[in-house]
Image: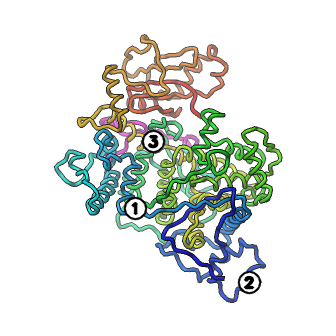
Amino acid sequence: MTMEMKDSGSVVLTAYHPHSPARIPGMEQSFVQDTPASHSPTSRKSLPRCRRINRMLSNESIPPPAFSRSNSQASMDSTSMEDFWCEVENIKESSEDGSEEATLLEFKPADEGELEAEWLQDVGLSTLISGAEEEDGQALLSTLTRTQAAAVQKRYNTYTQTLRKKNKHTVRDVRDIFGTSDSSLTFETVPVSPVPSNGIQLPGQKPVWKSVTSNSCLDCGLDKGNTSITEELSYEVSFSESIMVLPKTQEWSKNQRFKKEDSALPKFTVQKSRFGLTEVGDLSPEDMKKIRYLSLIELTAFYDALGVELKRNRTERVRGRENGLFGVPLTILLENDQKKVPGIKVPLIFQKLLHKLEETGLETEGILRVPGSASRVKNLHQELEAKFYEDSFDWDQVRNNDAAGLLKMFIRELPTPLFTVEYLPAFITLVEKISKIKLQLQALHLLIMLLPEANRDTAKAFLQFLKKVVANEGKNKMNLWNVSMIVAPNLFIYKGKRANQQEMQAAATTAHIVRLLIRYQDILWTVPSFLISQVRKMNEAAMNNSKRQLMFDKGVRKLLRRKTMERERPERPEGAVTFPPYLQSDIPEGVIRVYAPLHSKVSMAIQLNSQTKVKDILARFHCENRHGSSQNVRGQIQSLHEIGGNIGQHCLDPDAYMLDVYRANPQAEWVIKPKAS
């Protein structure tokens, strides 16, 4: 049989949804014409279908990819990828029986200059396009490093040159934007010397590192027997600036092959500076928005420094269901769930499926790999949609393999992928074009920082579960590579022109990406300190109201006017606590007043020295309030928060040295309260 493949000029991404049968081209059909004549139909039928597909991978008649040699191409033997293709086959069969529906996302080709315009908007510099003076991103531009500024300059120059060619409208001259006499776009960049993890470089001060044991390092090794050399990751200098120290003549190895053994992955640690470490949930949503701006600029500069093109997709918005469980956008699902459980960050149905599997399925042999009954999964799916929010669904009837099938179905049916449509090509590129795992990890780290909050929190919960599955390898027979192969098609599978060949070429690549996500997840959820330092500088620039009176939005201007009216008293961010005047009096240098509104003793002045840690302050408050505080407060885990000044809100690492944090943000308030879950 000859299969007709229409060239529509666009690439299509497929997500799977319940309701109607999907139209997915058969995998073996696309390879039949390439199969040697000696392979009779009888011999093919004698093998399981997923094994026949896997055998096709080693067929010499399959043409090489059109793009440059991929690390995934020929990097795995066919048997090592069998689980991947069996999972692809299971997905296809679940779509054919009507339990899932295929929704196509068309990737629209971009006109020249449109990608640059979208990029400028996504990094918070839309005013360079609109020309609105009141929203010019001068605060953001003032924080950029040399490589980051070059990345912005490159995209802005391409955008302006394209518009001039098209003659669409008058383009703002960079001299009007930055007040320079030179027509070339230039920025005053921040120094590339190391800066404190969560603060500002003090004059004449060098970063001080403490010697730590392995217990206080961020250790991402899953196998304790790994004897490979441990590499240390630095968050003090931007990744793109670090690339520049490599010899320009250095070429990445083109023949690097994946090794599926867990021990083949290097072991990384992140040594804590005196400012500690910051996780994504430790910063306010406003500051995390700025982290996303800076992460995209840094990712672009990082790829530029490596000579790699940062590709992204352009898609039309897809409207998912507005109620129910499966096929509902994460943001809408969370809005509905938060009416029932305020403050929830991961969808309730997803949490329940994870809990079910963690409670009874972690030791089940072949969990995730062995599919559940298609008919049972279909019936459970329908029953969940009808009974879940009524709390009448019987979870005891759900078998572990069926629960795993529902979990994977939930991920596949999301209207847009968990790792977003826009940057799926960037995930693939980081493996296909970058051979060194440390550099792959840095690129992956920035991509995680780019995720919307709902996607990031859901992905975090999922990866934590997968890490537990791998930890039980002795009983469930699922090692890191097995789990990665099973999960990869559910996260990264796509359809389009020559879809099956594209899947074949990307198979090992996507499995390796999932392996990195699982193995190094603790690192990936930590906000790089150089980004936090840049956020502080952005906030300071906005507060200082630069000479040109440029600011992000009308809210900043209103805020500055309010600050002037209140003289030197800053606006209290959300989470700050109002205290009587006698507690707000000036205090000596090196002394901070810590507030604990939920304790019986609500305020305490503390003299800081070079060895005072956050956990010392928490211990002192706990000692002072061990009898007076309510039982509810004593049962909660309390954290010290830095609020206001040059940060929105920041939950501090217990190991952070307070004097260093205080000097980085002397205008902040210090409040003890429960950490947001």
Distance in Å between CA atoms under marks 2 and 1: 47 Å
Nearer the observer, disc 1 or disc 3? 3
Q: Amino acid at mark 3?
A: Lys
Badge 2 amino acid: Pro
CA–CA distance between discs 1 and 3? 26 Å
Q: Quadrant of residue 572?
A: top left
Where is residue 560 drawn, in percent x and y?
A: 33, 28
Inter-mark Cα distance, 3 to 2: 56 Å
**Label 3 neighbour load within 10 Å: few <14, some 14-19, many 20+:** some
Considering the numbered disc 1 on the image, is that residue within a helix, a strand or a loop? helix
- Residue tagged by mark 3? 289
Identify the residue under disc 2: 41
- Please report the residue visible at 62 percent of the width from the left and 16 percent of the height from the top: 629
Viewer-proximal residue, 284 or 433?
284
Please tell me whether residue 366 belongs to the stretch shown in magenta. no
Residue on which disc 1 sits: 306
Identify the element where label 2 is drawn. Answer: helix
Q: Quadrant location of residue 502?
A: bottom right
**Badge 3 element:** helix
* Residues at marks 3 and 2 touching, judged by CB atoms closer than 8 Å: no
> Where residue 157 appears, x then y in whole percent?
29, 57
Image coords of residue 55 (percent x, y): 67, 77
Q: Earlier in the sequence, mark 2 or mark 1?
A: 2
Stretch of the chain drawn in magenta:
190-216
Colour mapping? rainbow
Q: Who comes first in sequence, dot 1 or dot 3? A: 3
Query: Which amino acid does the dot numbered 1 rest on?
Result: Leu
Image location (x, y in percent) of residue 209: 44, 40
Q: Is residue 338 above or below residue 368?
A: above
Q: Residue furthest right?
A: 397
Inspect this view and state whether residue 440 appears.
Answer: no
In contact (CB < 8 Å): disc 2 and disc 1: no
